[in-house]
Amino acid sequence: MSAAAPRSIWSSRPAFILVTVGSAVGLGNIWRFSYMAGAQGGSAFVLVYLSCVALVGLPLLMAEILIGRRGRGNPISAMLKVAEENGASSWWGLLGWFGAVGALLILSYYSVVAGWIVDYLAQSVSGAAIVTARDAAQGFDALLENPSKLIFWHTVFLALTVGVVARGVISGIERASMLMLPALFGILLFLVLWGAVMGDMRAAWHFMFDFKPQQLTGQVVLSAMGHAFFSLSLGMGAIMTYGSYLNKQSSIAHNSLWIAFADTLVGLLAGLAIFSLTFAHGLEASSGPGLIFQTLPLVFTHMPGGRIIGTLFFLLVLFAAWTSAISLLEPFVAWATERLGMRRALAACGAGFAVWLLGVAVCLSFNVWRDWRIFDLNLFNQLDFLTNRIIMPLSGLAIALFAGFVMARENVRDEIRLPAAQFRLWLWTLRYVTILAIVLVFVYRLMNPES
Ligand code: PFF
């Protein structure tokens, strides 16, 4: 280990919460959540999602922060250190690798989708009109067919991400989140109000919150649970790394409650804003991944002030994606600076370059290399499958096992510092509910790739 400078510590508790909410709130909340809720019947999905956050997401979020803070290092050294402290095998260090490398894999395709957002933002600013549904669909298809445009926007987005991470934990990551997150919340609230005034909020509300038990299928439960993982950034070392910069006095339980609450709130508010505008124009909410790329641009073109609203919307998604992407790059960069003694800027550029290369291949998988398929999936979907359905749940499971069974109880309690009854409730949920739920989702989703 190099003679490293003292590790950074977030400058305040709100800073930690904002930065971590920044990681959690991302494309998942706006792009994935809205189309999944829309395509899976709305309310049933939303309600199950909320229970999954409480029973699986929250306990695991606390476990990940606790390991990071206890280990005070990047995910790899944190796992090694905490394993050693608890007399466990150094093989647990592999879990840190699993997360840090998995996070880079996610970033490679996340950055491509975020690049689409930057393209749409540029179009909104320039006031490009989308007159018919056919224009909207053709516009999106044309983007996917255009490798140089995809690669260009992917490069722009990744450069933005590398730029922030290279500047450091406090002057880069914390500063960027302190600027972007309040702006994100402000824009979101404005869009919800706009949706209430100009859209069909009542229909959106009923769609999202009416309880329709017939829609509550096993598949909805499982995909909602999978989404809770993705949305809370679990299992990829991102939260662990952020936890490692948290001061010892801050309450992990309270912080986690705030993070889970804010993440869920953003998903729900974004859903209300999106659906109220979509329904007001008599459009369907169930168009799948194209919802925000095809349906919404059409809505924006046809409503008064649509150019400004469209610009604000895509700016909101850009901020959300940017702060999440930062957290996907940070675990590996933290490792390279702490373990290899590399300069942060160099580490960020090096990791960014590897991600960029893979991202270029992802861009090509929509067009030039579209016939290169495994199990009928192109590279984009393969990476999504590998990270989302295999790496994330497996590493989440390992984290839960580690904090729940491997770590000595007094070490866990020393970090979590909850009153006895609440501590027991958390540990019990983590050990028996969270673990069981992850195993169920993992097996089911692996066997039903279309779920
Ligand atoms: N939570 C992010 C989203 O909802 O878009 C995605 C994500 C970020 C997943 C960071 C995993 C991660 F480590």
Image: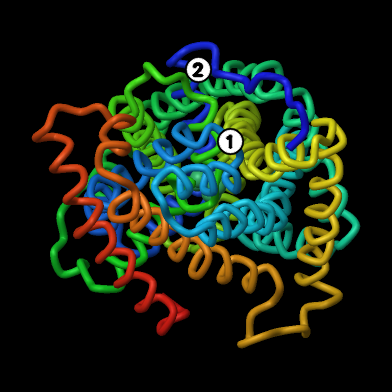
Residue 15, which numbered label?
A: 2
At which x and y percent is residue 196?
35, 29
| Residue 280 quadrant | top left
Earlier residue among tags 1 and 2: 2
> Residue flagged by tag 1: what amino acid is it?
Gly
Q: Residue at x 59, y 44 (%)?
A: 77
- Residue placed under numbered mark 1 in the picture: 73
Indicate how the structure is coloured in the image: rainbow
9 to the left or right of 52: right
368 to the left or right of 74: right
Q: How far apart are marks 1 and 2 (CA)?
A: 19 Å
Tell me the element at label 1.
Answer: loop
Depth order, front residue of 309/73: 73
> Residue flagged by tag 2: what amino acid is it?
Ala
Considering the image in quadrants, where does the C terminus appear?
Answer: bottom left
**Disc 1: residue Cβ within 8 A of ligand 1's nearest atom:** no
Residue 313, which numbered label?
A: none
Identify the residue at the far bottom of this view.
375
Depth order, front residue of 146/350: 350
At which x and y percent is residue 282?
42, 52
Tell me the element at label 2.
Answer: helix
336 to the left or right of 296: right
**Circle 1 Cα neighbour tier, 10 Å, few/some/many (<14 / 14–19 / ≥20):** many
At which x and y percent is residue 120?
71, 43
Depth order, front residue of 93/447: 93
**Circle 2 Cα neighbour tier, 10 Å, few/some/many (<14 / 14–19 / ≥20):** some
Q: Which residue is drawn at 77% across and 78% down?
A: 370
Depth order, front residue of 91/401: 91
Considering the image in quadrants, where does the N terminus appear?
Answer: top right
Residue 285 visible in the displayed image: no
In the rendered image, the vertical position of residue 368 relative to residue 170, given as above or below: below
Q: Residue at x 66, y 38 (%)?
A: 330
